[in-house]
């Protein structure tokens, strides 16, 4: 498509179809936990830039302004282009990763989603995982649980995922998953619910939770421990703010009781990565 700029062919991608992971700052990533996690994963895996979705046709630049920088006395403008990277691994048992990170666009969502789908199909992606950190009723005093969902019954059975339940106004991620369903490309979402009373980014606890779950499912080292210290500091900072307000402190205790009586919707078994691999190999046969 004309909106995609390819940097070079990813000749290093192995014959086994890679897994694609997408995170877009916006409605489904209000705390930027997912996009921060994916930026980290790009660095952690030494991923190479392979494609860019040009922002020109998709953004109102009065709402998402480009950034001016000076380099060597010359001006350089950083546009909100979505960037796609490829991470390859020496371990033949690990599938390569396609990592796409950016900002949810304002305009032409169907075309933007089609750009992502085009990249996925050109790189022969086996399945696509979207990650997000929307606001929810999670208290900051508990580990932030990750919820997974998919419309693919086989994938749901193998990974213990639930069906999508949300109905209502959606975002680009919803449009993307609908397109993927119609094209028959398996996909699932991972969302970490962040406390709706503290949604300002960054949220290192959310980033760590998403990466830990992704590692459990894929078997790929995500380096999520890098967020440990920042997550502790984040929780201590919120603790101090909540302690200063009796009403909010009481509300948090109510949320704690609700969360303590509920179950995480994703299993914690160590065989999840094997189940995913079995599913992907079944798709390729």
Image (tube, rainbow, N blue to C red):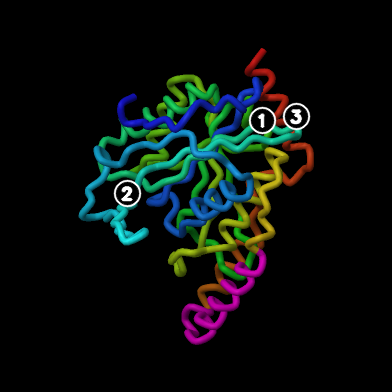
Q: Residue at x 32, y 49 (%)?
A: 79
Furthest residue in direction right, as rendered = 270
**Mark 1: secondary structure:** helix
For disc 3, the marked residue is 92
Q: Residue at x 57, y 56 (%)?
A: 207
* Quarter of the rendering occupied by the C terminus: top right
Point out the tag, 3 or 1, that comes first from the N-terminus. 3
For disc 2, the marked residue is 79
For disc 1, the marked residue is 157
Q: What is the distance, in whole Å, between disc 3 and disc 1 at their CAs?
A: 26 Å
Point out the tag, 3 or 2, that comes first from the N-terminus. 2
Q: What is the distance, in whole Å, between disc 1 and disc 2 at their CAs?
A: 41 Å
**Mark 3: secondary structure:** loop
Q: Which residues are magenta?
A: 228-249
User: In the image, residue 95 lies at what x, y percent?
Assistant: 67, 31
| Residue 188 seen in the figure | no
- Residue 231, by quadrant, is bottom right
- Residue 256, by quadrant, is bottom right
């Amino acid at each position: 498509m004309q909106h995609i700029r390819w940097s070079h062919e990813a000749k290093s991608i192995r014959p086994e179809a890679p897994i694609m992971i997408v995170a877009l700052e916006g409605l489904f990533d209000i705390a930027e936990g997912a996009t921060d996690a994916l930026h980290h994963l790009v660095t952690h895996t030494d991923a190479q830039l392979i494609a860019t979705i040009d922002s020109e046709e998709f953004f109102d630049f009065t709402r998402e302004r480009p950034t001016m920088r000076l380099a060597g006395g010359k001006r350089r403008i950083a546009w909100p282009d979505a960037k796609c990277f490829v991470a390859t691994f020496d371990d033949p048992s690990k599938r390569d990763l396609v990592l796409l990170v950016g900002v949810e666009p304002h305009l032409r969502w169907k075309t933007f989603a089609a750009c992502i789908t085009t990249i996925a199909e050109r790189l022969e992606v086996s399945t696509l995982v979207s990650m997000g950190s929307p606001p929810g009723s999670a208290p900051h005093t508990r580990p932030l649980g990750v919820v997974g969902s998919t419309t693919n019954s086989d994938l749901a059975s193998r990974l213990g995922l639930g069906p999508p339940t949300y109905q209502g106004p959606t975002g680009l991620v919803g449009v993307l998953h609908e397109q993927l369903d119609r094209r028959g490309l398996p996909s699932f979402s991972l969302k970490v619910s962040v406390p709706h009373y503290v949604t300002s980014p960054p949220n290192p606890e959310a980033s760590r939770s998403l990466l830990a779950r992704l590692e459990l499912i894929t078997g790929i080292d995500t380096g999520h421990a890098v967020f440990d210290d920042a997550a502790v500091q984040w929780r201590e900072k919120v603790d101090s703010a909540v302690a200063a307000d009796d009403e909010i402190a009481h509300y948090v205790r109510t949320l704690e009781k609700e969360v303590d009586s509920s179950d995480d919707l994703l299993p914690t078994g160590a065989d999840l990565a094997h189940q995913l691999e079995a599913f992907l190999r079944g798709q390729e046969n």
